[in-house]
Structure formats: structure tokens, C-alpha cells
Amino acid sequence: MACFCKDTVSMLALTLPSLSVSASLSASLSLSAAAQIGAMARLMMNLGVNFNPDPAWLQIQFPTISLSASAMATLSAFAQLQAMAGLLGLNLTTSLGVSAFAELAASVAARLSAILSLGLTFNPGPWAQMSAALTACAQIQAALKLNLFAPMNINVSLWANFLAQLQLILPMLSIIAQLGLNVTGNISAQLSLILKLMLGIPMPQLPPMALTMMASLTSTLTAIAQIKLSLGIDPLAIGLPAVHLMVQERIQATISMVESLLGMSFSAALQFLAKLQLGPTLIATPLNIRLAANLALPPINWSIPAMGSLPVLSLGLPIAALMAQLKAALNMNLALSTCMAGCDMKALGF
């Protein structure tokens, strides 16, 4: 059994008003500071890391991906659904996990109606802005520690085709890892069995208002969970203004770190980075290259619908995301066993 327990919803109802921050725009970060931090993080991510390839890699013949971009997006969505379900303790590659997720989806649909009746609105904007700034700060600090600016003693252009081919295979490697497939086995046969199971998950009907509210709530919770992880605090316990000050301090500390290590002002550092040659990224790790080279990938000839036409993805992904973020942001877990008393799952059809 898996249920968004009615007792959990009762606890959530006490917390939700603190997430309804429609009047919190005054706590927004300085747009210029947040934009500059984000721009530097993107530049540093594009630079990649010091690349020390093995010349023998150039002889590797990578398998060819025969799927369209739409089909790959659908498979990636199935893998993402399994990954999020795994965070909840469910395995959608098994019949037991599939049944449990169907129960969870039914209970979420029922609880969303109760949450809608509270009449709350959620504005993820201020939370998301601070979360993005913290993520950018972390990326910049990690990049500085990796010494991205040391000159590379290789001809990067020589590796352009190799890296492009590897980039095409990485989504399939991610799908294989998230679904727990055997990389050297028959991938299409393994995928077929798992997709048949997941396509059999019944999905509830959700009105547009419920979907909109769920998306806003999930975005808010996602940002709060990231802030919680970055700062090591409970954002809701200390309040939005206090979180705002802590994020501003993190931004200033990151700016000072950049200026100290590069010996120039932050604005000059931005201009300097923009002129540097783009380098290989973290994709070209020995593990990724070994997995890609050994991938047994026969042509997948069966039709794969667009993800928007599959309720298990268009509804299942938002439902799994909501539950995963409730766990990450508020430490609220779904029930994996029947309540001692007062369980209403039978009334929901299970």
C-alpha cells in the first residue's frame, strides 16, 4: 500500500499558509547581483574541467541511437518517474511497486481537492530566485576549486566529434541507470517489459485547477528543499526575510572569493571568462566512456508515443514530484502501510 495519508494532509494544512508568500516580493534579491552570479555560473559550466583524455579513446566506435528526440524524451520521462518513485520507496519496475503507485496517485487526487478548498495560492518566485542564486554560488565555488583556468595542453578541436558522439549516448546511459537495466544485455527487451508495467498504472482525473495548484506548490517546495540543503537550515522556521539575508551573504562571499582568486573585480572576471575557449565538460569521464563503448543497443523499432499523450507521465510525474518535494522540504513521507485506525483508502477505491 502507498497513500498520501489524510493525517499527513492535516499536518500539511498547518504548514501551507507559511508557503503562501504572494506578498513576499519585497524580499526579492537584487536582480543585478542574482543575474551576474547566474551568468558567471553558466560561463564556468561551459568551460568544463581540465581534460586529460586517453588517445586510445579516439578509436572507440560508439553505438548509434536510432530513436527520435521525442522518443528519447519519453523514455527519459519514464526513467525520471522511476527515479522519483525510488525516492519514495517504490520500484515501478515491479508489479508491487506499480500497484502502490496507483494507490498513491488516487490518494493524491483526493487530497488535492481538500487542499484546494483551503483557498491558498503559492508564489514560488522569491523562493526560486534565492534557490537559483545559491545553486549558482555553489557551482562557482566548486569550479574555482577545480582550477578551470589552467591552460589545457591538448587540441580540443581534435576531440570535438568524439565528445559530440558521447553526448548523444548520455541520455540512454541515464535511462539505463535510472531503470536499473543491464548495460550489456538486450536493452530493447528490458525496456519493453518495464514500459508495459508502467503503462498499466491507472491515473486519476484531475481538474485544471488542481494541476495548476500542484505545479505551484511543487515549485515552491523544490526551491525550499534546495535552500534547506544549501544553507543547512529550515527556511520555514526562520522565515523568508532571514533566508533572504543569508542568501545575500552567500552571494557576497562568492563574489569576494572570485575577486580574491582571480585577482580582478567581479565584472572584469565576467568579461575575462566570456573570452575563454569553451572546453570539454564533465561528460567525458572514464566511466561514461566505458559504459558507452560497451552498450549493447540494437535498433528499437517499436513506436514510442510522445510523453504528453501518456497519463502515467503527464500526471504521474507531477504527482511523484509533489510527493518527493514534500519529503525533501517538509520531511513528510507517504504511508507505506495501513493506518492503525481510520484509514480511508477503501473509500478511494483501493
Image (cartoon, rainbow, N blue to C red):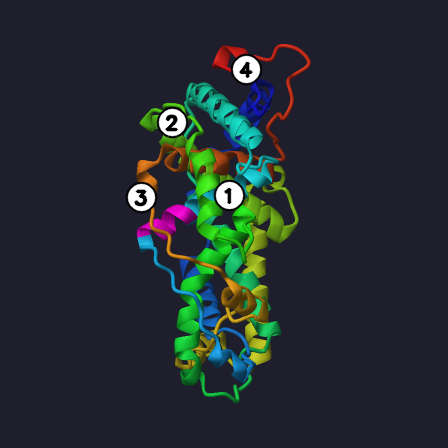
Residue placed under numbered mark 2 in the picture: 210
Q: Position of residue 124 (x, y in %)?
A: 44, 41
Whichever of labels 2 and 3 marks the residue nearer the N terminus, that label is: 2
Q: For the residue carrying disc 4, how many other residues have a C-alpha within 10 Å: few (<14), some (14-19), or many (20+)?
A: many
Whichever of labels 2 and 1 marks the residue nearer the N terminus, that label is: 2
Q: Is residue 11 above or below residue 153?
A: above
Q: Nearer the viewer, mark 3 or mark 4?
A: 3
Which residue lies most toward the right here?
Answer: 340
Residue placed under numbered mark 3 in the picture: 306
The amino acid at mark 1 is Thr
Name the residue: 50% across, 87% down.
154
**In the visual, does 189 lie left or right of 260?**
left
Whichever of labels 4 and 1 marks the residue nearer the N terminus, that label is: 1
Along the viewing direction, whichever of 113 and 89 lies nearer the viewer: 89
Name the residue: 43% across, 30% down.
200
The amino acid at mark 2 is Ala
Dot 3: element: loop
Q: Label 3 vs label 4: CA separation?
A: 32 Å
Q: For the residue carrying disc 3, how many other residues have a C-alpha within 10 Å: few (<14), some (14-19), or many (20+)?
A: some
User: Does the segment drawn in magenta span residue 103?
Assistant: no
The amino acid at mark 3 is Ala
Dot 4: element: helix
Q: Where is residue 219 in the image (x, y as percent from the top left)?
A: 45, 41
Name the residue: 50% across, 55% down.
174
Along the viewing direction, whichever of 338 and 252 lies nearer the viewer: 338
Residue placed under numbered mark 4 in the picture: 345
Q: Label 1 vs label 3: CA separation?
A: 26 Å
